[in-house]
Amino acid sequence: MSADRAAAGELRNRFRTHYCGRLNTGYEHETVTIAGWLHRKRDHGGLIFIDLRDHTGICQLIIQPEKEELFGMAEKLHAESVLCVSGTVVRRSEETINPRLASGEIEVIADEIRVESSAVPLPFPVADELPVSEELRLTYRFLDLRREKLHENIVYRSRLIGEVRRYLEEQAFQEIQTPILTASSPEGARDFLVPSRLHPGKFYALPQAPQQFKQLLMVSGFPRYFQIAPCFRDEDARADRSPGEFYQIDMEMAFIEQDDLFEILEGMFKHLTETMSRKRMTQYPFPRISYREVMNRYGSDKPDLRLPLEMQDVTELFVNSSFKVFASNTKEGSCIKAMVLKGHGNEPRQFYDKAERRAKELGSAGLAYIQYKEEGPKGPIVKFFSETEMEALKKRLEIETGDVVFFGAGKWERTCKIMGGMREYFSDLYTLDPDELSFCWIVDFPMYEYNEAEKKIDFSHNPFSMPQGEMDALNTKNPLDILAYQYDIVCNGIELSSGAIRNHRPDIMYKAFEIAGYEKSEVDKRFGHMIEAFNMGAPPHGGIAPGLDRLVMILRDEQNIREVIAFPMNQQAEDLMMAAPAEVSPLQLRELSLKLEVKEEKESDK
């Protein structure tokens, strides 16, 4: 057998000479041996038909009644039994060709069947994509993975990782593995802790991300690093986030500016889109939207740009309005936002009542609106507006008969978020193209925010990002006006990753933390090893880490991240198949110098 065939996975041995999905009319009259799982069995007028499945596809077998011993064996076979079958390839008659199968023009007349593994009745069928409870699917995940759609998702994931590696290696990245057992981080989500047997009373932590290690690799002189990195965070599940563990395409580069990273990542997503999907990008290069602008227009820093709805600021139109609810929100720090739904001004009253209920769920006191009907503007707030205000509003928003305008008023950030929530609520009114990939960069995040509860300045995002303007900005600007070299990459309303150009200078780092109320001694205690490394020569550097699971989910049109992970946990962070987490023996605890004190859950805590 040639090395090329071996590399392609085409092993030939006593189990098989050919693969089910690769047989075609070119093999007519040949004797072949194929192996796989019994996908379906049908008895048609004395002939038994078996669909045999391997990782390449399905091939139909015929067992003829004159081969009595073989026929009797076939009658007793259960679905998903593992078979090795030898026989002759024949061409199907024209009327029996199955165009849905790669091997649909041929079938194999069986001469010998060897049962390598006999399957018992299954908890759910593999051949039919019938609805099965998630609990059952996760308990028998090895069966679930045999089903066509999920199986294809995992194969696709493997191919995508291969393309990521190829692209990044061509861009001079080096794949470097970082530790799994490391130190607990004082920042971020909860750590998963691992007790040390050799050091009683001390614990390792599983990495929430290889953040510090990849920065130290830059300090070590590796200019471009990447890793398909496992990350561990003790946080709750949701549709686009797996509890416990996930994988990211972790990247870091030295001597770069923000635009350099954008070019590399946009190129990678373009390559993956063109080689791995039939989808298309809306825009290339990706649009860049500042945090301030994205909140003003979409009310979210994760906007789905396919949705043709934007908020507009109409604050200045109501500075002298007699409508006090609006006039009182024209001062600095507050705003009035409007959102036009084209052609929805004649919806029934129930439509507006439901919209108002949703606005209240988002934290609003109500939801003002104006309908533009044939007979003129209608709505609860029309009577409070002057003719001049109504005309200015119509001109600013380019309103037409049949439209409706919804309003939000209040503190800027809160109002933007509420109206952003309403934008998402109204998305059901629009048909979004699932084959459109609308990427964008969110840039210019504020370095600091004001903590109302503690009445102090806090970091608003990543404290280790380089402030725009560096030390000069920290010394001369109002902290709330300082922007950071931080960025998010978003696709179709899903955040794939956050990233930053890092703060590699200890003097700037101490000053940045000082503004947020941290003493130098506290910074040294928490991050001394990083500062020590930076003091020994650190290049400017930056990076990002797109979520692999989320990327596969988008490209495969899946709504739940568990559909693209081979062995996911359930929403309670349990592995139902392996029964994890599980209790351990007293001996194991003694070896780790641990003693458990499990508190019983009170009824009031549930």
Image (spheres, grey):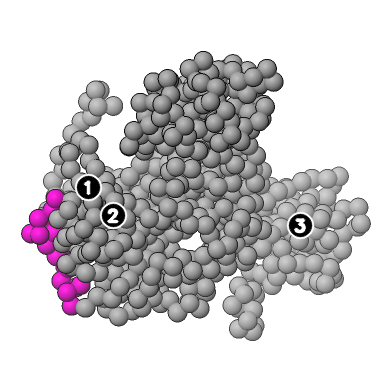
Is 170 located above or below residue 325 in the figure? below
- In space, the residues marked 2 and 1 are separated at their CA atoms by 12 Å
Proximity of marks 2 and 1: CB atoms separated by less than 8 Å: no
Q: Amino acid at mark 3?
A: Leu
Q: Residues within 10 Å of mark 2 (few under 14, many from 20)?
A: many
Q: Which residue is mark 1?
A: 458
Q: Quadrant of the C terminus?
A: top left
Q: Which residue is mark 2?
A: 482
190 lies left or right of 587: right
Q: Amino acid at mark 2?
A: Ile
Q: Residues within 10 Å of mark 1 (few under 14, many from 20)?
A: many
Q: Which residues are magenta?
A: 517-536
Nearer to me, 468 or 223: 468
The numbered mark, 2 or 3, whose residue comes first in the sequence reads: 3
Q: Amino acid at mark 1?
A: Asp
- Secondary structure of the residue carrying tag 3 is loop
Task: Tell me residue 315's x, y (percent).
Answer: 43, 34
The numbered mark, 2 or 1, whose residue comes first in the sequence reads: 1
Nearer to me, 155 or 335: 335
Q: Is residue 514 magenta?
A: no
The numbered mark, 1 or 3, whose residue comes first in the sequence reads: 3
- Secondary structure of the residue carrying tag 2 is loop
- In space, the residues marked 1 and 3 are separated at their CA atoms by 60 Å
Residue at figure coordinates x 47%, y 34% from the top left:
314
Nearer to me, 69 or 306: 306
Task: Tell me if residue 212 can be seen.
Answer: no
Q: Residue furthest right?
A: 94
Q: Which residue is mark 3?
A: 101
Task: Tell me residue 74's x, y (percent).
Answer: 72, 52
Residue at figure coordinates x 48%, y 42% from the top left:
298
Task: Tell me if residue 334 can be seen.
Answer: yes
